[in-house]
Image (cartoon, grey):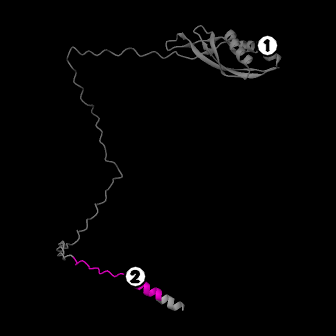
Amino acid sequence: MVIFLAVDAVKEVIERVTTVDVEEEPPPPEEEPPPPEEQPEQTSPPPPVAPPPPISIATNPPQIETVQTPPPPQPVSTRPSVVEAPPGPPKPPSKARGVRTKNERSWTARIQEDYPPRALREEVEGTVGVRVTVTADGRATGCSVTASSGNSDLDAGACRSLERYGRFEPALDDAGNPTSASWSTRITYRLN
């Protein structure tokens, strides 16, 4: 019975199918194929090129001949408007030198004796880097701390004492005249 039902369903589907006639378009007219491209005539490959000859580098340079005759003198201009000045006298040797300390042992001992009082009470020790300007008369001025000891009393005391007690021979310029210059040192404060 199931088979008969399936057959009836197939008949129904077949009756429902519509047929349509489709006509194919005729193919376009054939074009003539393009003429074959002309093939270039086959030629033989180019002849091989020989490598350039090796370059010969001489191990000995060519000899140079020296002649012992001097060249002819240059013509001297006779024009009166051009007058060459004779060379001046040679410069004297420079007398310039830097700052030198004067009686350094005595004034460094005085700086140590002038230990800053508060640092002495607190038993603080340290080393202070200082720079001063030494004037043309050998006095120290314009002190600045270049490396701190870590204690402001020691730093200030080092500058104060160096300006007060430091004595110097001033720097000299090229002519040997005293001039101002800078001088640097380190002052170490130690308790005994």
**Which of the two labelled residues, at mark 2 and mark 1, occupies the earlier sequence position?**
2
At x 72%, y 12%, the residue is 106
Q: In 3D space, how far apart are the residues under numbered discs 2 and 1 (Cα atoms)?
A: 126 Å
The answer to if 26 sits in the magenta stretch is: yes
Q: Is residue 95 magenta?
A: no
Q: Position of residue 115 (x, y in %)?
A: 77, 14
Crowd tier of the residue under label 1, counting other residues whose Cα lies within 10 Å: few below 14, some 14–19, many 20 or above: few
Q: Position of residue 57 (x, y in %)?
A: 33, 54
Specify whether 142 is left or right of 63.
right
Quadrant location of the N terminus in the rendered image: bottom right
Region rendered in magenta: 8-27
The residue at which mark 2 appears reads as 16
Kindly identify the amino acid type of the residue bearing the numbered disc 1. Answer: Pro
Q: Between residues 87 and 51, which one lies in front from this camera angle?
A: 51
20 up-or-down from 77: above or below: below
User: Looking at the rendering, which quadrant does residue 123 occupy?
Assistant: top right
Q: Quick check: 169 above or below 192?
A: above
Residue at 69 percent across and 9 percent down: it is 164
Rate crowding at label 2 as few (under 14), some (14 to 19) or many (20 or more) other CA atoms within 10 Å.
Answer: few
Mark 1 — residue? 117
From the viewer's perspective, is the residue at label 2 or at label 1 nearer?
A: 2
For the residue marked with disc 2, what is the amino acid? Arg
Q: Nearer the viewer, residue 51 or 55?
A: 51
Using the rendered view, name the quadrant where residue 50 is placed: bottom left
